[in-house]
Amino acid sequence: MKVKLDMVGIVVKDMRAALDFYRVLGFNISNDLNDEPHAEVNQDGVRLAFDTQEIARSVYGSWDEPTGHRVELAFLCESSEEVDRVYRLVTEEGYEGHKEPWDAVWGQRYAIVKDPDGNLISFFA
């Protein structure tokens, strides 16, 4: 058996708010998708998909608001300075910082923010 990771899906409360967050990160996402129940963006061969809670309910049969941290989206930055810059950019846009940039014991520069749905989003170099 051979499987290939092709897409990461995120369930969102508010499509426009979610897409605006990823636009700040530089994703080229059409404004035409702001009011759609499903949106996708392809970045270098990895698809990131967004579904409203209503779509999730229709696919899974129900939807319960999740708690806890289960999956991390981690974005590779060009340098340690870029980690700091992206963290500042995101938090200056009004998004919540979870952990300011630091030098991790495993040798990477790391920072964590929260997207509009409370997902932890990491930046590292």
Image (cartoon, helix red, strand yellow):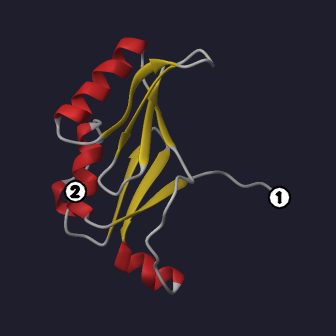
Disc 2 residue type (three-letter): Ala
Real-space Cα separation, disc 1 to disc 2, in angstroms = 38 Å
Q: Which mark is residue 46?
A: none
Q: Which residue is mark 1?
A: 1
- x, y (%) of residue 38? 34, 68
When asked about the image quadrant of residue 88, the answer is: top left
- Residue drawn where x is 26% and y is 49% of the image: 29
Q: Which residue is mark 2?
A: 17
- x, y (%) of residue 79? 42, 14
Circle 1: element type: loop
Circle 2: element type: helix
Is 38 placed above or below 89 here? Answer: below
**Furthest-right residue in view?**
1
- Residue drawn where x is 43% and y is 71% of the image: 65
The 10 Å Cα crowd at callout 2, few under 14, some 14 to 19, many 20 or more, is some
Q: Indicate left or right for 45 with 107 as reference.
A: left
